[in-house]
Image (cartoon, grey):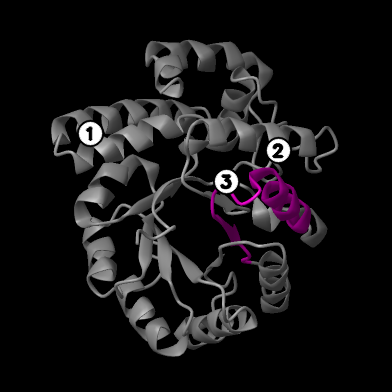
Amino acid sequence: MESPFSGTWPALVTPADADGGVNVTVLRELVDYLLGKRIDGLYLCGSTGEGVLLSQAERRQVVEVVMDQTAGRIPVIVHVGSVSTRESVALARHSQEVGAAGVSSILPMINTGVTGIYAHYQQIAAAVPDLPFFPYLFGGQTDAPALMQELKQRIPNLHGAKYTGPNMYELGRVLDQSAAEWTIFSGMDEQCLFAMMVGAPGNIGSTLNFMPGLYRDMRTRFQDGDLAGAMTLQRRANQVTTVLIQYGFSGALCEMMRLLGLDCGEPRLPHLPLADNRKADLLADLERVDFRRLVDL
């Protein structure tokens, strides 16, 4: 039986209203848009979803709305990482109560060394022992293979990880020590194909909010042995990503969503919005890389 934790997973944007709160109407529209693109799952309140910039109540609201809108059609993983371990535990329990398929967490935001990381993750995972737990690892922050090897001994419901980084050697080492039932998601859109080549069965990413079909087709081409076709899609996706980075990724991503008819508002500080006098230039640069055709896939 194929694992539910595979394929194409947008790291969902959290739409903001005029006051910076959660825009529930647009959040539901965004979920429906992505379901129409045949995504395989959703990752909530991560870096793209600005989870750590939301209040506890807002994070619960996002999860409840998305769970209601998806209505069991796809699995949902909730990122519960917070400064406080206690808050992470509370968010994990709430995610379990509303039917999430798994929970995830970044490393502790206060550097306590590996012993503190172990204790932090153990408490979160132990709060939801029947729910798959996925550490959210950034390449270079710590020795990811060593960390996963240790967590494997300490956390019975460890089910894999989200690995965001360009180091395919390190990602490969994590995959090599994975248990058969684990999923190691790749989290760097720019490296998606290369992560597939190393063996990652799924990807979670920001640009999947507006062009998930491209990444789905990339995976299909790769699985069919059309590496050249998959590489062409990766290069075209990276052209769009490069444009967004050049304009300030968070603000440009919100403007991109607005261009698609999904007004996600402005990013939350300290992320900065795109200045009005740069919006026409952004659109012109996106048109030059034929972004609409990629969005339509």
Comes first in the chain, label 3 or label 1:
3
Q: Is residue 36 above or below residue 12?
A: above
Comes first in the chain, label 1 or label 2:
2
Mark 1 element type: helix
Q: Position of residue 10 (x, y in %)?
A: 50, 43
Quadrant assignment for the C terminus:
top left
Q: Is residue 161 above or below residue 25?
A: below
Q: Is residue 154 above or below residue 280?
A: below
Q: Is residue 259 rendered to the left or right of residue 179?
A: right
For residue 27, the mark is 2
Type of amino acid under label 2: Leu
Question: Is residue 67 rendered magenta in the image?
Answer: yes
Question: Is residue 3 rendered magenta in the image?
Answer: no
Q: Position of residue 50 (x, y in %)?
A: 64, 49
Comes first in the chain, label 3 or label 2:
2
Type of amino acid under label 3: Thr
Q: Which residue is mark 3?
A: 48
- Asked whether residue 139 is in view, the answer is no
Q: Which residue is mark 1?
A: 230
Residue for point 78% across, 43% down:
22
Q: Is residue 167 rendered to the left or right of residue 61?
A: left
Residue for point 64% across, 22% down:
258
Q: Is residue 12 rendered to the left or right of residue 273?
A: left
Type of amino acid under label 1: Ala
For discs 3 and 2, the disc positioned in front in the rendered view: 2
Mark 3 element type: loop
Quarter of image, res 129? bottom right
**In front of the other: 244 or 246:** 244
Residue for point 52% across, 27% down:
247
